[in-house]
Structure formats: structure tokens, C-alpha cells
Image (cartoon, helix red, strand yellow):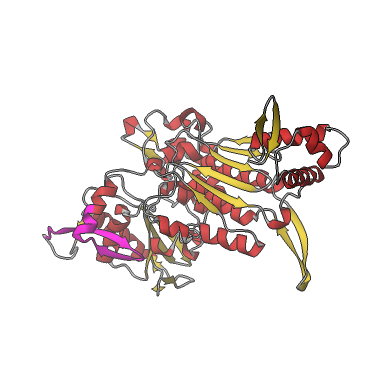
Amino acid sequence: MAIPINFEELVSGSVVESSRIEAKEDFNPERVVHTICAFANDIDNIGGGYVLIGIAEKNTLLQLPPKGISREQVDSVLKRLFQLCRGIEPHYEPIVEPRQVAEGRYVIVIWCPGGQGRPYKAYKNVYKKGSTERLYYIRKMASTTVATPEEERELYYVSSTIPFDDQANLAASPSDLSLALMRDHLKEIGSSLYEQSEHATLEELADDLQLLSGPPEGLRPRNVGILMFSDHIHTYFRYARIEVVDLPDPTGQNMMEKTFTGPIQRQLRDALAYIKNYMLESKTVKFADRAESQTVFNYPYAAVEEILSNAVYHRSYQVSEPITVRKTPDVLEITSYPGFDRSIKDSDIQARNIRGRIYRNRRIGDFLKELHLIEGRNTGFPTTFRALADNGSPMPDFQMDENRDYLSVTLHVHPAFQPRESRRDAGRRDLEQQILDVLSERPVLISELARLLGYKGITKRLRTTVDAMLSAGTLKFVRDGSRNRISRP
């Protein structure tokens, strides 16, 4: 069976983090089965990992090009792998593909997604006949290790809930998936499975992509399949959409709204293209202290891209609220539900050290990484901060309620794009200050106020300004017999 990922990108480390790859120049049965077990346990919910046999590794770096193993070794390794995996409890089978890398030389790629039946145990000693001791294995950083008693408890805790995107959607059927969308994905990422899928049935290809769950007589698509490879996404996830609102005026005049629907990767791409083309602006500015001018943006695209991509990746698709992007003359705000995971402390957020340990949608993350829509490795917000700093923009604000039910990330417009005060607003503020100055001593009638300001009578502009100041509380009425005089508060 082919692996649904581009092999070259896998070994280059551009799609999958190095901590999720274990490479072995030669086949070490015990080490390999322990690592398969650890990836299947997926204690951090990051999507399991890959074991590569036939590639040397030095200081976590793959030694390329791979030397590979011979065709004869491939057959014996596959047979031994089958036997070893039967010793994993409960039963777990990884996806295995021999990949030819040179004439007569192969790399065996073992894909180990997080298992549905975790936690898993594997034999401690695979060489000793009659051995019965099985242990829980987990990944810590880039190493496979035996779980401590505390880690075993944590493993049972995370295993009690399968990430929502990897759960079966009991209301849907495999026919809700789109064969064309699945094949388009494989073609885009350059997977060798694309050519093989030409004559595959919908269920065969969905099974290869690990998008189905359940027994043969009751197969159901997983939520990630509906969200990314279905034309009927809103039948099951009504609010899985991105809403973009441009408010050039606080009154709502000339407001522009755009809603993006369909598979979530399409939503993300279309929304980013719209924001880039219609909401982002550039300007060349000059500085007094240097000869070179600089082109700056109201909001740097790289920052917007990272924040919106993270919102699509980390949002809860069980919450009936869309992702919203709201732009005003001063700010661009991206809101999603819920907020940061509790593993990220408030102090870390304030220090802008935002590194999540628990991933809400491990399968969605893997697919988005393959499409280069996200990078992973907790690089999203560092990329955002760097893009803002390079553009000369203020750092973002993060708002959440006490329960972290939502997250709003606010980007402030570059100072060069701050809305300039209109002449009317400036004149109104000047008049308000003049009124306050002449009222410094005593309350006066509005007719007296007009004369003090040099007017021949009460003008419409004066009356409107006084009424606005009374409403705002910057002026007050003082009763004098039957007449109202105007005074400072």
C-alpha cells in the first residue's frame, strides 16, 4: 500500500517534524516495534509518526541520499514486521510501503498514525521466546522510551478521548466523501498514491487515506474526511466557515462582507487570497535618519496568514461558531473558538512564548502541513511576531474570556496607515476646547456663550456642539430660576 505523502518532502523534513521520524540504516526489530508502539500511542496527539528503514541518522538529521536496503532484505523485513506487530496489544497494524531510491535499493516507509485502540503495549524483548512482558512505549522529543507510571496515567487520560477530527461521523456515510477531492489532494502533494488511485473505488482510496472507521458492514467517514474531502461539509458542520467583514466606517456605511465555505483548506486559501487582494495595502515611507525609503503594509500578509491558518487548524469544529476576520481603520481582528489550550499559561501568552503541547486536530494538521498551509513545530506565532517587527507594526493583542471559550487576535494597523483626523473633526475639537475655556469661571446662557466666543448669535454649529458635549457629560445644565445655564461638570 502506498503512503499518502510525498516521499521527498517527508525525508527532507519540510512537512513532518523530525521528532515524528525515526530513521534506521538497518533493520533493528526490537527498536522498530517499540517505536511503532510509541507512535501508535501518540501521547501528545500530534498524529503519530514514520519509521524509515534504509536511511542513516546522525544527531536527528537524516543522511541523504539514502543508501537503502536490498530487494531481498525488503521481503524478509516485511515478513518480520508482520510478526512483530502481532505482538502489539491491542492489535495495531501500521501502513507500510517499500520505496525504491536507487537501482535495487529500497527504503521501507512505515506510517504509524495515532491508533484508535490506544494505549498500546509491545513486548520488551522480541528475541526471547516465550517472553510475556509487555510495556507502554511513548515518544519524548525525538526518542522512544518506556512510559513512567505518571506517563502511563497521562497516556490513559489522553487515550480516553480520540481527537474529534479523527472520530467517526456516525451521521455521514462514505458516499459523502469526494473521490475527486481526495485525488486532487494526492496530486497536489505529489504522492505516489495518486497514480495508483486512478482505478481505485471511493472506499478504497478513503481507506488508504485513513478516512474511514468501523467494521466493513458499518463504515463511517471520519470527521477530518468530511471537513476536507466532502462537497457536503455544511450538512454536518453548519458553522465551519470563515466570515470576513471590512468596516471602513464605524457607522457601518460601505461595509463589505464575504463568507467562505466548502472544504476547510479551500476556505483558508480563498479567504487569504481575498484579504491579500482587497484588504491589505502598501505604502512607501521615508525616514529622516536615513536615505533609504521602505515599503510597509497596513498588516503584513505573513502575520495574517499564520494567525488565520492557526485558527483553522486549532479551532473546535464542535462549536457552532464561524471563524471571523473583522477589519476597521485601526485594527484587524481574527476570532475563533475556543481559546488557547490550558497547557499554555497566561504568563506565557503575556511573554509571547506561545508553545502548545496538546494539538486539537492532529489529522487536520497533517493534511494542512502536506499542503504547506501551516508549518507546525510551534512556529506560527514566532513567524507572526517576526513579520510584524520587520514591518514596523505593533505587536498583537490576545483576548480570551476566563474560560477560554474564544480567542481574538488583534493586529494594529501600521502607524503610516493611521486614519488622519478630518478637518471637520479637528474644528469640532477646537470649538469644544474654546467652550471649556470660556466656561472656566461661571455658568452662562447659551446666548452669552455665543457672544463670549465672538458669534453674533447662536449658530447651528454651536448648538450642535453644545448638545453633543451635554450628551457626553463634558458640559452640564445648571438651573437658574426658569432658565438653564451651561457649566463645566
Residue 257 visible? The answer is: no
Residue 89 visible? The answer is: yes
Direction from residue 480 to residue 27 in the image, left or right: left
Vertical comparison of 461 with 27: above or below: above
- At horizontal 18% and vertical 64% (from top left) the residue drawn is 125
Direction from residue 341 to residue 191 in the image, left or right: right
Direction from residue 80 to residue 142 in the image, left or right: right
Vertical comparison of 310 with 321: above or below: below
Viewer-proximal residue, 210 or 204?
210
Please tell me in which quadrant of the rendered image residue 141 appears.
bottom left
- Where is residue 234 shown, x and y percent of the image? 51, 30
Q: Is residue 151 magenta?
A: yes
Direction from residue 287 to residue 92 in the image, left or right: left
Vertical comparison of 158 with 54: above or below: above
Viewer-proximal residue, 23 or 418?
418
Q: Is residue 472 magenta?
A: no
- At horizontal 61% and vertical 60% (from top left) the residue drawn is 388
Viewer-proximal residue, 485 or 94?
485
- Label count reads 0
On the rendered image, what quadrant is the C terminus found in?
top right
Seen as rendered, the residue at the extreme front is 481
The residue segment tinted magenta is 131-153
Viewer-proximal residue, 425 or 307?
425
- Where is residue 339 shown, x and y percent of the image? 44, 46
Seen as rendered, the residue at the extreme bottom is 58
- At horizontal 57% and vertical 49% (from top left) the residue drawn is 410
- Where is residue 330 shown, x and y percent of the image? 66, 48
Seen as rendered, the residue at the extreme right is 456
